Amino acid sequence: MTDNQNRTAPRPGIKRRSFIKALGGGIVLFFAPWNAIDLMALPAPQRRSLTKDYNAFLHIATDGTVSCYTGKIEMGQGIITSLAQMMAEELNVPLAKVKMVMGDTDLCPWDAGTWGSLTTRAFGPAMRAAAAETRMVLVQMASEKLGVVPERLEVTDGEVSVLGDPAVRVSYAELAQGKKMERYLEIKPAPEDYTKYTLVGKPLKHSDAYEKVTGRAKYTGDLRLPGMLHARILRPPSHGAKLVTADLSAAEAMEGVSVVREGDFIAVLSENRDLADIAIVRISAEYSSDELNVDNSTVFDHINRGEYRPNVVRNDGDVELAAPQCGSLFEHEYHDPYLAHAPIETHTALANFEDGKVTVWASTQSPFGLQDTIVMELGMSLETVRVITPFVGGGFGGKSPSQQGVEAARLARLTGKPVMVAWTREEEFFYDAFHPASVVKVKSGTDSEGKIMMWDYNVYLAGTRGADVIYDVPNARVTSHSEDRSKYRVHPFATGAWRAPNNNTNTFARETQIDIMAAAAGTDPLEFRLRNLKDEKMKGVLRAVADKFGYEPGKTPSGRGIGIACGTDAGTWVAFMAEVSVDRTTGAVRIVRLACAQDMGLCVNPQGALLQMESCLTMGMGYTLTEEVKYVGGDVKDRNFDNYSIPKFSWLPKLECVIMDRPDQPSQGGGEPAIIGVGAAVGNAIFDGTGARLFRVPFTPERVMEAMEKSEGRKV
Amino acid sequence: MMEETIRFKLNGNETELVTDPNQILLWVLRNHFGLTGTKYGCGIGFCGACTVLIDGEPARSCMIPVSDVAGRSVVTIEGLEDGGELHPVQKAFIDHDALQCGFCTPGMVLTAVGMLEKNPSPTREEIVAGLEENLCRCGAHKRIIEAVEDAARIKRGGNVK
């Protein structure tokens, strides 16, 4: 068996019989996501990892309730609403009849994880096709029941009726009555006729808002089981530190506290969370340290000294030959620091063993990934591990790794009791898989007309997402340099995907470089972009954002403090405009306006998509102005919100968003694109206002002052 | 550990518990009373997810020993509804879609409720200042401000905007 086949082997999960039994009748529809999604031109990695097994995805209960099962999870991005919306549309049922069952490894079809803005664009089409076929199955059943050919039937609000004779009807609920039926669907997605949509494309608010404003929404930490223990785990002072000795006696002496140890894994547990908090600090431990000699002030030298694995992802024309022929050459280096995800809900998990089977409730973006990890780390079989995902209080990529779930499972096994592991804010920062610090080096050249003739782009540690040229450049090379641990250790701690992983880094570098060339050419930066672009979609979003903003052309720096940026992410085209005011005595930057236009194909829920855009723009101000994890070697210095500053109410600028009307185009990602250009647009706006050019995010007052001093004498 | 009997009003009802008086109010609410709408976010009073009302004033329950609320009135998110009717601030949060992951929401709602009790006609700047120390990572700030503006208007007898 090849590795590839291995990965696509069927996952047994819960036995199908017991699953159907648990549902208590009705109609269960199965489909193999592989069949459907394969046709959707998914990127190879996702396609490879899809199961070929049939999965239940839909249950029609005898009361007409339609349960939709998905391995995706809800963390605030709103798919609990938009997926239900798609399901209701294709099945022709009222939205209120659709119940979403999400992120339960026993009940839901396998899914790699909720990330990459993939839910709507990759899972969505498969789910819709399956729902559309389910509707045909139901119409066929109705046809048999009513004795009328399917061609003469129509479906409205979950009721199948005869065309021209609406009194002759049967509901989905009646069709499901007294049935225990399984159907296996072969999905053949057909082109969809968007003109017939009544629900898709309609703006809908969060369907879970009532639960959330009343405190009824249950997040993992809100669950309670009889006899449940709260755990605190002994943590090293820094990454790479190894435990030498630990004195547990003071904690062990505490009433109502139990102490467990398995190798270096030491935890205190109590029914009372306060006691666990007290007990953990009573353990005295010594560690040996193994720290990289690097901190946040030396990180970019450290990166530049390294040896990496280069991967040329584009090589058009000949950059070496073209360079000497360019009238103007530009060479700059861009720096991006480590960033924390900092969701307000910390990583939390509750684990319970029963009859040799463990159930783990976890705040995770990857319930099936966590299931695999528990299987591996605890030496269990897949059938004996169930992961359930309650409401998740923010993820942003940070909850793709879910170490807390393994910890809870391990402690539940050690103690024989249900165990809650809820990380403190300090643990959340310490174990976060940070956005990686990265360096981008760009060399580019223009001819005397301001046409970009050469582009040589080298990105270190930030991957290829958003690294493409996007502009029409005859000689272009893009090289991505990734970590080669056998040669050079770069990061002292874990790094991972942070909302629109690394696209922020690449868009910042590219769009700043473009702005520098526009300024040198004496051309309006919007005009410079439009002239150097062939991509009509990109031109479209640029014009749309300029229109929304009321942009008046002008050479930069104009003194107005307006900046532009654009790019692509998750299949979506996006353009930005920012207006800033800079305090010339302190260097403090205030973002006054942020505008964004987005071409995301068919927008399923314009309200949800708009919220995600506002969310991206607001969150993006953080990496732009303040966010930068401070550390010395493996010792993370920022461990709470007193040091790590995220956007607050007073930062809020005027936000203006445009979603292009593209109902005839396939749906694309919407959870991340609108964050990618905030840094670049704001940096370009600072230049436009002051003549000071910034090459490193975040734009702290010190860095802005320094850049203004360097630019002194430049006329603004 | 010395235990004491602590009496206070919780969501309108007189209540008492025998406990270590140094226990943190947040954990008492969540673990003893099962009022899990009050969230842990940072443990040092910086994020506001644990906000409750103490005698009508927003307070950070992660920083307060339970003995501090003896003889006082504590309102959590579960206690805001009046006879099954949502508080105008809760309604406005729904109407304005002023939330995403919802984890900061109870703290936001209670902070706004406390603010409007003191100042029924806040300006936008006053709303921003009142909410400033509550953190939201999802970036729902714009809508939260709009929701609170609207809630103030409705509380004063106006119509939904």
Image: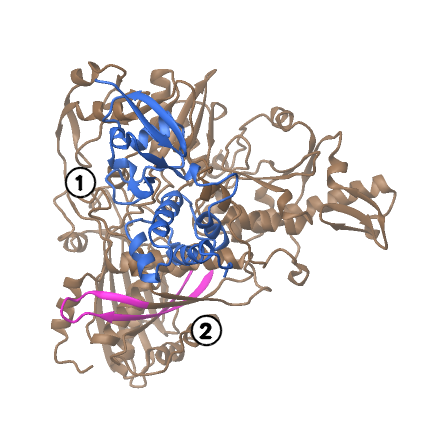
Element under label 2?
Answer: helix
Q: Is residue A165 above or below residue A582?
A: above
| Chain letter tied to brown | A
Horizontally, residue A666 falls left or right of residue B127, namely right
Instruction: Where is residue A225? Give x, y as percent.
Output: 43, 22
Magenta span has A566?
yes
Residue stretch rendered in magenta on the structure: A565-592
Instruction: Where is residue A99? Give x, y as percent.
Output: 59, 40
Q: Is residue A698 above or below residue A434?
A: below
Residue in the foreground of this view, choosing between A320 and A98: A98
Q: Which residue is mark 1?
A: A634
Of circles 2 and 1, the one toward us is: 2
Q: Amino acid at mark 1?
A: Gly
Q: Which residue is mark 2?
A: A544
Magenta span has A543?
no
Element under label 1?
Answer: loop
Q: Earlier in the sequence, mark 2 or mark 1?
A: 2
Horizontally, residue A7 falls left or right of residue A160, namely left
Residue A517, image quadrant: bottom left
Instruction: Where is residue A701? Give x, y as percent.
Output: 17, 63
Q: CA distance from mark 2 to mark 1?
A: 45 Å
Q: In percent of the image, x 40 and y 28: which residue is there?
A: B34
